[in-house]
Image (cartoon, rainbow, N blue to C red):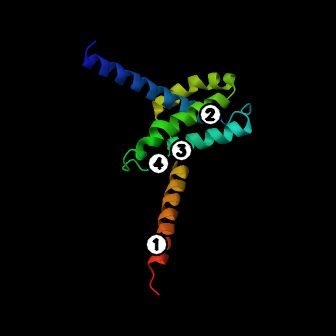
């Protein structure tokens, strides 16, 4: 096996994993409203789905290494944990519906995006206030 074949194989595996992740997010997006889903699972799933579908990241991608940490670790880990909390019969029921939704494109969650923007603005204001207080003379 040469290097190009290995790269193609790895790339195909990553594409498959990304497609599965997107599908699982849509399954959770559709299934969390089901009355058979426990309340804790609903809340956890809403948080994971809202963050994943948010147009903004908690850690912006331009920050080296940390910027992609949420996309590579936090979102897949959240999806994995949330899927384990759902009743199996509910997930199976919504998998076919999720495939149709995936073809239409992923929904955007502007509420989560707005909350993340507010978080960063509040953090910037706090840092500004903190450093202004430290640098004030007399």
Mark nearer the viewer, 3 or 1: 1
Marks 4/1: CA–CA distance = 25 Å
- Look at the image and tell me whether residue 106 can be seen: no
Residue 76 lies, with reference to residue 92, above or below; the image says below
Q: Residues within 10 Å of mark 2 (few under 14, many from 20)?
A: many
Callout in the foreground (1, 2): 1
Instruction: Please give the name of the residue rendered at 46% of the width and 71% of the height, measured from the top-left corner.
Output: 128
Residue linked to disc 1: 131
Left or right: residue 89 compared with residue 76: right
The residue under the point 67% across, 31% down is: 85
Q: Is residue 65 left or right of residue 46?
A: left
Camera-side residue: 89 or 74? 74
| Circle 2 SS class | helix
Distance in Å between CA atoms under marks 4 and 2: 19 Å
Task: Examine the image and state in which quarter residue 13 appears.
Answer: top left
Of the residues under marks 3 and 1, which one precedes in the sequence? 3
The Cα atoms of the two marked residues, 2 and 3, are separated by 13 Å
Mark 3 lies on residue: 51
Measured as percent of width and height from the top left, residue 55 is found at 46, 47
Q: Residue 82 carries which label?
A: 2
């Amino acid at each position: 096996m040469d290097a190009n074949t290995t790269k193609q194989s790895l790339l195909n595996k990553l594409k498959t994993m990304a497609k599965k992740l997107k599908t699982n997010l849509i399954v959770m997006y559709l299934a969390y409203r089901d009355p058979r889903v426990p309340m804790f699972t609903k809340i956890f799933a809403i948080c994971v789905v809202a963050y994943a579908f948010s147009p903004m990241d908690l850690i912006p991608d331009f920050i080296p290494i940390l910027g992609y940490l949420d996309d590579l670790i936090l979102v897949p880990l959240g999806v994995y944990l949330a899927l384990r909390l759902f009743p199996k019969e509910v997930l199976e029921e919504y998998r076919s519906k999720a495939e149709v939704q995936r073809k239409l494109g992923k929904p955007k969650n502007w509420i989560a995006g707005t909350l993340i923007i507010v978080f960063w603005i509040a953090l910037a204001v706090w840092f500004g206030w903190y450093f202004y207080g430290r640098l004030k003379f007399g």
